[in-house]
Amino acid sequence: MPFKLTYLLTALPHFQLLEPINSDVSSIDIAQLTADSRQVAAGTLFVAYQGVSIDGHRFIPEAVAKGAAAIICEDARLVPTSASIPVVVVPNGREALAYLAAAWYDFPARRIITVGITGTDGKTTTTNFLYHILRAAGKKVSMINTVNAIIGDTVLETGLHTTTPDAPDVQRYLAQMVEAGTEVCLLETTSHGLAQHRVTACEFDVAIITNITHEHLDIHGSLAGYRAAKASLFESLAMATAKGIPKTAILNCDDWSYDYLKARLDPLGVTWLGYSVAGHSDASLTAHNISTAPDKTTFTISHPTYSFEVETNLIGDYNISNCLAATAAAIEVLGVSIEAARRGIVALPGIPGRMERISEGQPFTAIVDFAHTPNSLKRALSAVRRITTGRVIAVFGCAGLRDVEKRVLMGEIAAELADITIITAEDPRTEELDAIIDETAQAMIARGAVEGQTFHRVPDRGRAIYFATQLARPNDTVIALGKGHEQSMCFGQTEYPWDDRDALRAALRGAPLLTLPSAHSNETV
């Protein structure tokens, strides 16, 4: 159904209406909201903003010609002088689009408890832990994460290079969740999603941080810009509509982000709770009596007023940390019982592409993991080192057109923690693959690695994985890192079908799964 333009404008925190020619604003009906000029038809409210690579303002004349009923923009200079439609100028078009989308779907976040989970690594695992805990408690819960979206009983797979969806999609999903009777929405929230206002107007009730480490500096410009984007999720708690539970931040006392976020939250009066694997004195929940086996981890969760033992199929101290974060939100904020938390933790069987074991009867361990940052690579290699009696053989690469500094950092980490490393492709995009690999190789050499002995260059990812399995001996661990659950790899500007799990299975069966057809001569080995 159409909305009055005046109603939609009331959702905007800041705007300036430029008086139109021959137009009565109060009488204008809006039939559609979009930032894509290709979707504009008569009665559309078109939102233009400066994007990462494309300036939406250049499409304003096209939108006007197609019958747009009104224009929202950051700069009105490209609006044709002959246009007799309302023009609204806003300081940030992305932010305006988010608020408009929320109004379009009748502010669904105000009718549902919304939990935002952010951090460099561990977001998806933490989201899944909390999802299973809430399910075990009998709560109606939906979630959107990197791997999939679950709305009621409907599962939507998202296996390509996805992050937080755009604001109109987020608000549409929230509306579908409300319609499905959802009580709690779990929203994995990336720094891109925060900085680009994709989750603005989500009215968060709980915000969880896993960690802040080196990542996405290509987008945010600096670590300061990156952490400020993360902090905006927590600061938004102070401004969101109250919904019956205290607005609460869940902070990782073991991460350097703790002091940073606490200092920003305290002046705002936002309630916060801490968690810690290392036993930090400020933490409400801590982990003790940790016991790790190749296929499970057991530990005790302790609070000043209670403690209980849990078991999870996931390994690694970082997954204990993720579990604590989810448990803190569930028990201390969302009212889940200890017994439900225990059942939910053990109910999580694993997460696609996160320390996922692949078995074809081989005498060594084979794992696929999503680790694609220096911190996650270090944690993944450290975790498999503890469960491996033989050698650790790592296969990984670094993406093109992304944070270039991590290529050196990841090479240094691999030189320290892996016995053998195969450097390969990981979404080179339009960069020269050999040049990307060389940056990592030079970092390994500087740390004492020897090419041909402790590391190798195999640009084709399928051949690299196959080579690793051929090197493996009984009791070794082969771990393919960086792609995880993803189902494509980008060469040039094209996404080609790719799944590390399929490639590892094929390699274990004795046949490499090649990355690309040989016709792409400049993009393959």
Image (cartoon, helix red, strand yellow):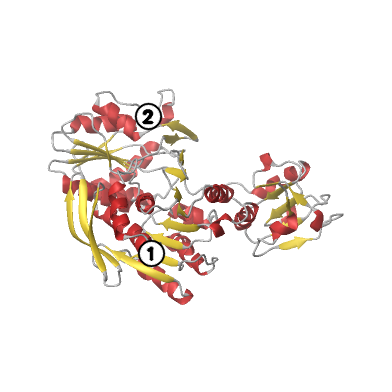
Image quadrant containing the C terminus: top left
Q: Position of residue 184 (x, y in %)?
A: 46, 55
Q: Position of residue 389 (x, y in %)?
A: 12, 43
At mark 2, the secondary structure is loop
Q: Quadrant of residue 301?
A: bottom left
Image disc number at residue 250: 1
Residue drawn at point x = 32 percent, y = 50 percent: 408
Q: Quadrant of residue 519?
A: top left
Q: Amino acid at mark 2?
A: Thr
324 vs 392, left or right, is right
State which tag comes first along the sequence, 2 or 1: 1
How far apart in space, not on screen, are marks 2 and 1 (Cα)? 41 Å
Residue drawn at point x = 74 percent, y = 54 percent: 4
| Residue position marked by numbered label 2 in the rendering | 515
Which sits in the foreground, 37 or 522? 37
Q: Is residue 503 above or below residue 354?
A: above
Which sits in the foreground, 227 or 246? 246
Residue 302 visible in the current orientation: no
Which sits in the foreground, 136 or 470? 136
Q: Is residue 198 above or below residue 232?
A: above
At mark 1, the secondary structure is strand
Q: Amino acid at mark 1?
A: Ile
Q: Position of residue 139 (x, y in %)?
A: 42, 53
Residue 365 visible in the current orientation: yes
Q: Position of residue 50 (x, y in %)?
A: 62, 52
